Image (tube, rainbow, N blue to C red):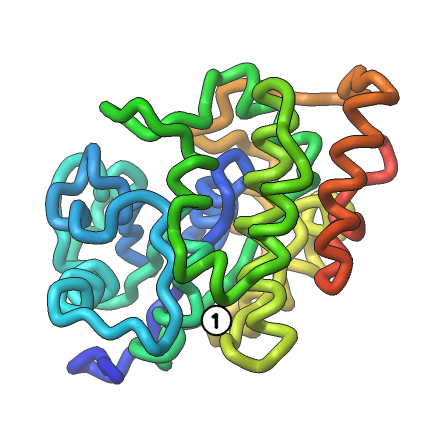
Amino acid sequence: MVKPADGRPRVLISSMGRSGSTWLADLLNAERKYKIVFEPFFPARVEAASSFGYYRYLNIEQYSKELLPVAATIFGGEIDNEWVNTLNHDNHHSKNILVKSIRSNLMLEWINHHFPLMKIILLVRDPFQVAQSWVKLGWGNIPKSEMSDLETILSQESLLSDFPEIKDLARYFQPEGAFESAVLEWSILNHVPLKQAKRGKVSLLLVNYNDIIANPIIELRRIFSFIESDFAENEILEKFSKRSITSFTKHKGSLGLTDKIRDKCLSILDSLNDTNLRHFISSSN
């Protein structure tokens, strides 16, 4: 168990990429109270994180003298380079730390165990919207590697041992194309922390991106209450309509999926039915 020397709670927004985490981080930091640590588990930009690799699965039984000090440095806001400071302005030295990460969903149990003061927000967005964005951006491959994200995730024996249903899913469903691969990756990256939370193995706040869009005041008040911070409604709602710096595209209306692709993707979600992944599909899809 690692506690910050000053006893201050830390905040972690964890999600799959293209789920609105940059936008939410900016909303939570509307009053510039936080130093935001931007994507610290990205070895291509943060050399210190190379020991974690990409999409590392860690449970509480997996203790590493190599990983723990790096994580403590990250969550203490002590990592400092141009990349991790992407969202910072004049608050680089704030003792309030907000970490935004799209590569940490598979180690939330480990993080929660070793950093119990960390306020973990799991942000989830409609899988079809996320997959469409991934396809348009050409995402899904590990930098400077011949392996895809999905191959990297499924190569971890400890993950497949702890979640045999994922092993069965990967054996049964062979994705055809980038869209189906992204939906399969979305399913795994969200199923793991949701199941852990359901079993009481990790304490987190589940946030649905589309719920924020539909009911911003209610949802944002709930989030600010969870992180024990004042809700400055005027400043936050002013930022609400602004796009984040990582909003490369806007997606409106139907995604134009064929019935075949949609049905296959729904089957992927339903195969992990104990975490009700269909719940995150918006009515427009």
Residue depicted at 51% across the width and 79% down the height: 201
Image coordinates of residue 76 in percent, x first then y, are 20, 66
Vertical order, 127 against 177 (above or below): below
Horizontal arrangement in the rendering, residue 214 relative to residue 106 (left or right): right
Tell me residue 15's x, y (percent). Answer: 50, 49
User: Which structural element holds mark 1?
Assistant: loop
Place of residue 53 in the rendered image (x, y in percent of width and height, measured from the top left): 25, 46
What residue did someone put label 1 on?
A: 227
Q: Name the quarter where the N terminus is drawn.
A: bottom left
Q: Quadrant of residue 207?
A: bottom right
- Residue drawn at (21%, 59%), measured in percent from left and top? 74
Q: Position of residue 147 (x, y in %)?
A: 35, 28
Which quadrant does the C terminus fall into? top right
Residue 184, above or below 259 = below
Q: Quadrant of residue 220?
A: bottom right
| Residue type, numbered disc 1 | Ile
Q: Is residue 253 visible?
A: no
**Horizontal placement of 240 versus 4: left or right?**
right
